[in-house]
Amino acid sequence: MLKAFDRYVLKEIISPFSIGLLVYTFTLLINQILVLSNVLISRSASTWTILKILLYLLPDFLSFTIPMATLMGVLAGLSRMSTDYEIVAYRTMGVNNLRIYKPVLIFTVLTWLFSSWLIMYVAPESNYRFSRLYTQVVLSKAVSNIKPKTFYTGFPFYVLYFNEIDNPSGEWKGIFLYSMKQANDDKMIIAKRGKFIQKYGTRESHIALSDAVIQGFKKKEPKQSYSQSFKFLREYIPELINIKQTRRSTQQTLPHLLETLKHEPDDLSLQIEFHNKFALPFTCLAFGFLALSLGISTKKGGKISGFIISLGIIFLYYTIITTARNMILKKIISPFAGIWFPNMFLILMGIVLYFFTSKEKSIDWDGILSFFNRFKEKAALKRVKVLFVLKVKKAKFKLFKILDIYVLKRLTLVFTMIFLSLMFIFSILTIVDLIDEVIKNKVGFYFLLNYVFYNIPEFISFIFPVSILTAVLLTFSLMSKNNEIIAVQVSGIGLHRLTLPAFFFGLVVSLLAFFIQENLTPQYNKNAMETLNIIRNISRKTDIELRKNWIIAGQNELFHYQFYNRRTNRFVKFTVISFNEKFEISRRIVAKTAAWSGSNQLILRDGFERTFEQNTPHDFKEFDQKQIYVKEGRSIFTKKISYSEFMNIAELNNYIQYLEKNKSDPTKFRAKLYYKVAFPFASLIMVFIAIPFSFLMGNKGTLYGIGIAVGVSMIFWGAIGIFSALGSSGILPPFLSAFAPMFLFGAVSFYFFINIKT
């Protein structure tokens, strides 16, 4: 039976623990919300499927965030009690540190047991189910994303092209289907109408075609052509979801992992995962013991100081564990030593600090900070100081008043603290997520650190809005709690004027985000992709988005080549297919090679030409050399296009013009263009959102403000993800999909802002 003292301490711990768990977990979900919403909504996944995928992600994230939240909860709770001299009061009543540790131990044991259950059984299974379900949705729903006048290669052994979609029925019109099912036959199907029919869980997926004609010939004997007409035709597609997925080490439950280790005892990734299943949950106990000593020794700062100290400890812990994992990969230390050493280090620190605090001594954090401040002052150049003073004295107009500078300093401090903590969490999660790939493919740990570095601009785009929202909420709510808001109002300054520095700060952050997006993100994303390919040991081009071996020229011709030899500057196995106005095949040319002669002339060699009348073979001629004219010129074949993630706004706009010129659907990329314009200013919108809530909270406290920030952020990010996906799918106009969330949240926030009681 818990006594009143134990219940009181637990209450103080649970509040910051809950907020910390919410913040850390949501931070990890931010990127997933945007990526998954774009993928799933564009593929018409059901709401239940999306919820299932998010639920499958949660256990893996929770097993990672519960230990961090445990540290924050214990440290913030006890720091608050120490700051308000409650610890001193209990000591005068004869309550020693060991007695205080009882409720802490109860709490950390519970989080240890729950975290162990998650990481040993729930998270691996959920991770595996997420992988399977996500793959299923992406593959099975990919057909819904096919656009007219584009070549679709997602069907096994088929290339699909059609002219338009009949909106009422959803049928395709003017269909060209090239089959590679039979290696000895060159087969293509032309049909007036058609539709993809998929039956889930079966192998009966097919394309239903109306008024279809099959044209083909034997590759070894091209003279032997054949032609068949069908009123109705079913072309069966091999099962889209036929991928055998093996469980990675992180997707194996403890019993499964033990069984696998019996057969593969020397597998390094399995050994690391085995120790990790015990060491990571044990961190809850180690963090709890260390947080006890640190918490009761805190003089000032309350929960905020506990939050800051917990971030420092988390940073230290994961720096050690990252270094230890690197040493494991290099086989300098064993998996047991590498995985367990960080926990032993935490416990050792906890023991030392426990004996320190048992003598009723406290850590002088102010003294430590003042040491750094004195060092900073000595390091500053006198010349800079003089210039600064002179500049200030000569200024006739001050843009900011003393109050504005005070608010800006508070905002900058809180923003920096939150930004660095979230950046750190993103980086650690990335390392943990890819460590198995590094071990499996025997890649140097250096590449993993490089990958994290190249992802920094991408992380910044997600972290800036959340950081500024939380910073504004905390800054003004703390000022309200400390009665500073009342003092400002008494001096005759209204709340609207008080918030001016926040809007300025939000604008600066937004402009900085825009600058990073336009100047750093494209190249860094490309470098990150190249590094990830090295880590995963795969070969993938990063400078070409469209497969250009299938090209439509004008309205009536298709070009295809199997391979382009850069050394000889020749196309290999080049084909030209011409259609008449009724979309009936009129001519087909097949050549072994093709090469440019001038900017618009192609010389075809060693091939044949077959003409057709009403989709029926009519004439056949072989040739040694033949010249054809390509109106669009060389650029239609050789123009390299970067992935949209590697483009800034100007490059993406040029890409859209290129797609329009080549009669490809640019809807998805136009939505991305407007998204790139709108998204950096999400930080400014967050300021509008945060200010009304910060004054509505009154004296409800810091953690309440963080909770509000997380809740509002979840709604905002969800709205951005949904609208962005609807725009990419063509359901909403691109401009509306990008700016609607901004306008919507901005308008609601502005209404609350102007109605603040000043």
Image (cartoon, rainbow, N blue to C red):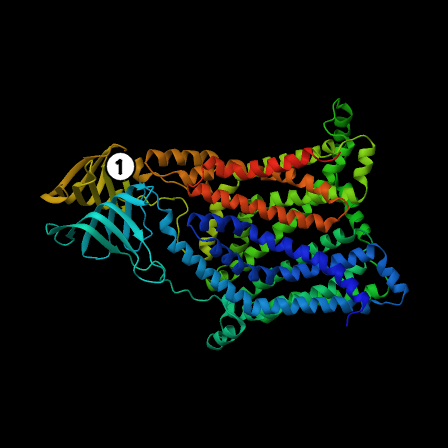
Q: Quadrant of residue 654?
A: top left
**Quadrant of the frame with the N terminus:** bottom right
In this rendered view, identify the residue nearer to me: 299 or 442.
299
Position above or below: 123 against 310: below
**Quadrant of the frame with the C terminus:** top right
Q: Is residue 717 visible?
A: yes
Residue furthest to the bottom in view is: 262
Residue 430 placement (x, y as % from top left): 55, 55
The residue shown at (62%, 50%) is 422
Position above or below: 691 against 389: below
Position above or below: 4 against 137: below
Residue furthest to the front in view is: 168
Residue 104 placement (x, y as % from top left): 75, 66
Relative to residue 706, is residue 600 drawn left or right? left
The residue tagged 1 is 553
Residue furthest to the right in view is: 92
Residue 192 placement (x, y as % from top left): 23, 44
